[in-house]
Image (tube, rainbow, N blue to C red):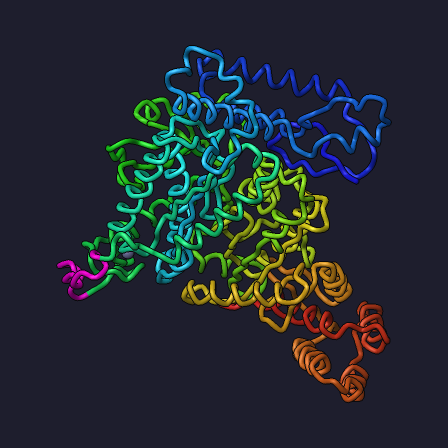
């Protein structure tokens, strides 16, 4: 049994497992903090901003249970069982969304009576309101198709900025579409159940006006996407009725919406067939001899990607995404409080990212000057309410960690510890569908619980991921395979949200980070049924990103194909359960006595093992693992190891290695990987 202590959201909070109780003083602290920040908003007349108030509530009520009554006549255990695992915040948010939807629904359904009588029977009569056509709400879902090839099919020129820019563009696109819907429906962001991973889920009233709004947004956003990206990405928007009884069991509409979405994806661009079948257009004039260097299209004018002398030509969209990625990197490096201004109809600078008729502009901190023309201001990963000074300030949680010193993939490969290679990691939560649909008991699949689960998953992958990779104070200690100093993770988040992530960077930092993320998720959920699997592959900084992404996908699949809860390291033959990773670390550390720590790689001092000996051991261990008749190589091993005489100071490490190799519990795979990784940590090319 574990529980969250009463705390303020924003820092890393993991559940406690020892028994304890939250006392009055802890509640008092939360209340005082809440009042203090509410006053700050009030002084700035920003307390009417629902988004700011929702953030304030999330910050102070996330860890308060939604009911805290003592069960009459029951003991503490009975009371505990009765207490829901849903936070007060999720309960408040869903209640607010429901109330405003019901208001619209009843106002539209009983227009003549609405202002004259109390519609008590109409609202409370369960039977009348639960018929198939009288569901008062809609569950609306959005899902972008074509994401994989949109993000990863790019040339390696300026890859890092393009990758980040493209994936962040998609996040903005989801927020933009959700905002269009909410603004059209005259609802607030309380109605958003979830955004991330290229999806959104929204609660809407089931009215004629709402149906029209949804249709309008769907066609408008897709017109824009069709025109801008040649039909390569599409926003699927579908909805299903949501009846009153679905608050108690939301799994039905959830499933049905999933089916609707699949259906929509099978009929891609069905209203655009005429355009799709039209004669191919002649290439744009500047594309007669050359295509966009990044995406390859030839129907858009090409311009220089950046001011440097790299001579990369790109289309307008690739250029905007590249610049977006660049400003995000630059701003993230400074670790300030990033904001994104949303401007209507007017570009404020060259670096604006356009989505339909809005322009998104990144700022390093909020400025009144820039804010006065903004129709909304997004505050990135910011829990300090005193920053929410614009009438349309709202939070945006996003994985934006970026290593401080590296601008391009090549730098990451060069500046890491050991071999100059890059690593790519793809990781996601195991059995997510089952977690939502089956691991919660049937009578407990309430909408609030679903919302609570998705919000926390999202909090981990969009927000805490930054602290984990940044090794921020308060977060679990990072996993290091050797005792290197002043470690900063030399990598970037291409994408993290929903329940999955994609990282690229120096291979060692990528590998160790995968261990960190797995351990952190275990700590965060305190639930052994919520696990992740991942796949990590090696590459060169000039390899096509699409190719690396495909390999990482195959590696992740290999980890999932077995019993899951695993990581594939380098190639599909090296799949390890997470539980074995500590053994792996122990094995590497048991060999540490042979090495000294150089500035950016491991070194072999005089009298220690030799490099060629390590290579020979690697081959023998590998052969040994692969052969069924394991006894075959033992004489070779005995011969190889027996001839070696360690120098002074290395005798102990040597005899413990020999003891392990000839012991009955030797794990050949583990040993092979330990030697391989050590060899990789020793290697530093380019004369270093
Ligand atoms: Zn392009």
Percent from the top left, x then y, of residue 285? 13, 59
Q: Would you say residue 293 is visible in this rendering?
A: yes
Q: Residue at x 31, y 41 (%)?
A: 355
How many marks do you count on the picture? 0
Residue 453 lies, with reference to residue 296, above or below; the image says above
- Horizontal arrangement in the rendering, residue 192 relative to residue 341 (left or right): right
Residue 197 lies, with reference to residue 361, above or below; the image says below
Which image quadrant for residue 276?
bottom left
Percent from the top left, x then y, of residue 264? 39, 52
Q: Nearer the viewer, residue 619 or 228?
A: 228
- Quadrant of the rendering where the N terminus is positioned: top right
Q: Is residue 278 magenta?
A: yes
Residue 60 lies, with reference to residue 529, above or below; the image says above
Query: Which residues are the magenta region?
Result: 274-289
Q: Is residue 204 magenta?
A: no
Residue 102 lies, with reference to residue 396, above or below; the image says above
Q: Nearer the viewer, residue 440 or 225?
A: 440
Q: Residue at x 53, y 33 (%)?
A: 130
Which image quadrant for residue 391?
top left
Which image quadrant for residue 464?
top right
- Horizontal arrangement in the rendering, residue 7 relative to residue 543 (left or right): right
Q: Nearer the viewer, residue 41 or 228?
A: 228
Q: Residue at x 70, y 32 (%)?
A: 84
Q: Quadrant of ligand 1?
A: bottom left
Percent from the top left, x then y, of residue 678? 66, 67
Q: Would you say residue 688 is visible in this rendering?
A: no
């Amino acid at each position: 049994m574990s529980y969250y202590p009463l705390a303020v959201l924003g820092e890393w909070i993991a559940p406690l497992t020892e028994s304890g109780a939250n006392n009055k003083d802890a509640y008092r602290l939360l209340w005082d903090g809440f009042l203090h920040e509410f006053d700050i908003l009030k002084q700035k007349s920003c307390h009417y901003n629902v988004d700011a108030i929702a953030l304030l509530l999330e910050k102070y009520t996330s860890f308060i249970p939604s009911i805290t009554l003592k069960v009459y006549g029951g003991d503490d255990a009975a009371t505990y069982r009765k207490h829901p695992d849903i936070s007060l915040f999720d309960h408040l948010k869903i209640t607010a969304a429901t109330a405003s939807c019901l208001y619209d629904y009843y106002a539209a359904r009983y227009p003549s009576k609405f202002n004259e009588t109390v519609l008590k029977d109409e609202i409370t009569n369960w039977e009348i309101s639960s018929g198939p056509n009288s569901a008062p709400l809609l569950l609306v879902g959005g899902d972008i198709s074509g994401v994989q090839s949109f993000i990863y099919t790019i040339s390696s020129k300026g890859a890092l900025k393009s990758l980040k820019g493209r994936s962040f563009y998609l996040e903005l696109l989801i927020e933009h579409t959700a905002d269009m819907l909410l603004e059209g429906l005259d609802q607030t962001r309380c109605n958003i159940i979830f955004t991330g991973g290229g999806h959104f889920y929204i609660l809407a009233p089931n009215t004629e006006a709402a149906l029209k709004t949804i249709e309008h947004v769907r066609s408008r956003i897709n017109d824009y996407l069709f025109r801008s990206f040649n039909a390569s990405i599409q926003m699927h928007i579908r909805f299903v009725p949501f009846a009153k009884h679905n608050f108690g069991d939301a799994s039905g509409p959830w499933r049905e919406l999933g089916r609707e979405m699949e259906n929509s994806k099978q009929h891609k661009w069905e209203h655009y067939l005429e355009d799709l079948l039209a004669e191919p257009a002649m290439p744009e004039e500047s594309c007669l001899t050359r295509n966009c260097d990044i995406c390859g299209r030839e129907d858009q004018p090409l311009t220089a990607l950046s001011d440097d002398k790299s001579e990369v030509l790109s289309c307008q969209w690739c250029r905007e995404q590249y610049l977006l990625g660049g400003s995000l990197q630059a701003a993230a490096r400074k670790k300030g409080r990033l904001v994104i201004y949303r401007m209507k109809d007017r570009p404020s600078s060259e670096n604006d990212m356009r989505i339909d008729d809005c322009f998104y502009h990144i700022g390093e901190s909020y400025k009144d000057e820039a804010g006065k023309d903004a129709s909304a201001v997004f505050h990135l990963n910011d829990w300090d309410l005193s920053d929410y000074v614009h009438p349309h300030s709202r939070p945006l949680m996003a994985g934006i960690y970026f290593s401080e010193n590296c601008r391009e993939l090549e730098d990451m490969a060069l500046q890491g510890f050991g071999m100059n290679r890059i690593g790519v990691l793809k990781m996601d939560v195991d059995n997510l569908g089952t977690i939502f649909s089956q691991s919660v008991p049937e009578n407990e699949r309430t909408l609030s619980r679903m919302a609570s689960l998705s919000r926390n998953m999202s909090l981990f992958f969009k927000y805490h991921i930054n602290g984990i990779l940044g090794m921020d104070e308060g977060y679990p200690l990072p996993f290091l395979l050797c005792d290197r100093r002043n470690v900063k993770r030399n990598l970037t988040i291409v994408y993290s949200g929903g329940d999955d992530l994609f990282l690229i960077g120096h291979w060692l930092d990528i590998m160790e980070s995968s261990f960190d993320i797995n351990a952190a998720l275990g700590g965060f959920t305190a639930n052994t049924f919520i696990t992740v699997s991942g796949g990590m592959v090696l590459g060169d900084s000039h390899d096509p990103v699409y190719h690396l992404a495909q390999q990482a996908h195959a590696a992740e699949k290999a980890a999932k194909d077995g019993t899951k809860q695993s990581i594939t390291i380098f190639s599909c033959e090296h799949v390890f359960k997470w539980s074995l990773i500590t053994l792996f670390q122990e094995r590497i550390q048991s060999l540490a006595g042979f090495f000294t720590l150089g500035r950016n790689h491991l070194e072999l001092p005089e009298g220690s093992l030799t490099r060629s000996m390590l290579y020979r051991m690697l081959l023998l261990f590998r052969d040994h693992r692969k052969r069924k008749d394991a006894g075959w190589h033992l004489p070779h091993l005995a011969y190889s190891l027996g001839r070696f005489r360690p120098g002074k100071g290395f005798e102990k490490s040597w005899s413990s290695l020999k003891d392990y190799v000839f012991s009955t519990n030797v794990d050949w795979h583990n040993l092979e990987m330990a030697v391989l990784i050590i060899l990789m940590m020793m290697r530093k090319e380019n004369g270093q």
